[in-house]
């Protein structure tokens, strides 16, 4: 069983910054990748940023240059630095991890944290 606990989020004005953090715990062999997705009201969930165990990163186009994902492998934690926030970044942000527990990798999800950007 793998647990992902998110922290951070909240209300910020447009142009401001927030940091989201996610910590993984439980019984597993290896975390292959971690990332963040978000879901705004009435919209589908979308991937925001992802980082592999080797440090490779991937971002959705709308956040490139504004968001930075980082990971502390030894502590199994991950952070998302969000700068120059826009009202359209308002969503529930979910931490996820691709984890090997026995033989095959599986995706695990956090409970989500609300980010609201006011104009």
Image (cartoon, grey):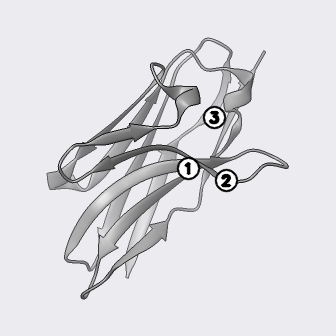
Q: Residue furthest bottom?
A: 102
As displayed, is residue 27 above or below residue 43?
below
Which residue of the protein is positioned furthest toward the front in this rendering?
A: 61
Q: Is residue 64 left or right of residue 38?
A: left
Residue drawn at 74 percent across, 23 percent down? 87
SS assignment at label 2 = loop
Q: Check the image and name the residue furthest to the right.
A: 42
Q: Which residue is mark 3?
A: 10
The residue identified by callout 1 is: 37
Residue at image position (63%, 34%) is 10
On the image, numbered disc 2 is attached to which residue?
A: 45
Near-viewer residue (60 or 66): 60
The N terminus: image quadrant: bottom left
Q: Are marks 3 and 2 in contact (CB under 8 Å)?
A: no
Camera-nearest label, 3 or 2: 2
Q: Residue at x 42, y 50 (%)?
A: 35
| Residue ID at (33%, 46%) | 78
Q: Residues within 10 Å of mark 1 (few under 14, many from 20)?
A: some
Tags 1 and 2 in contact by the CB under 8 Å rule?
yes
Sequence-earlier tag: 1 or 2: 1
Q: Position of residue 16 (x, y in %)?
A: 58, 15
For the residues marked 1 and 2, what is the alpha-carbon distance in whole angstroms?
A: 7 Å
Say which of marks 3 and 1 sits in front: 1
Neighbourhood count class around disc 3 (C-alpha, 10 Å): few under 14, some 14–19, many 20 upward: some
């Amino acid at each position: 069983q793998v647990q992902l606990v998110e922290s951070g989020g909240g209300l910020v004005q447009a142009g401001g910054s927030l940091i989201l953090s996610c910590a993984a715990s439980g019984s597993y062999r290896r975390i292959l990748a971690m990332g963040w997705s978000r879901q705004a009201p009435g919209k589908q969930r979308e991937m925001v940023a992802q980082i592999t165990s080797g440090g490779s990163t991937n971002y959705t186009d709308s956040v490139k240059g504004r968001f930075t994902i980082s990971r502390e492998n030894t502590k199994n934690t991950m952070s998302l630095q969000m700068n120059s926030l826009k009202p359209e970044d308002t969503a529930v942000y979910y931490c996820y991890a691709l984890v090997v527990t026995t033989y095959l990798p599986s995706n695990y999800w956090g409970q989500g944290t609300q980010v609201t950007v006011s104009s």
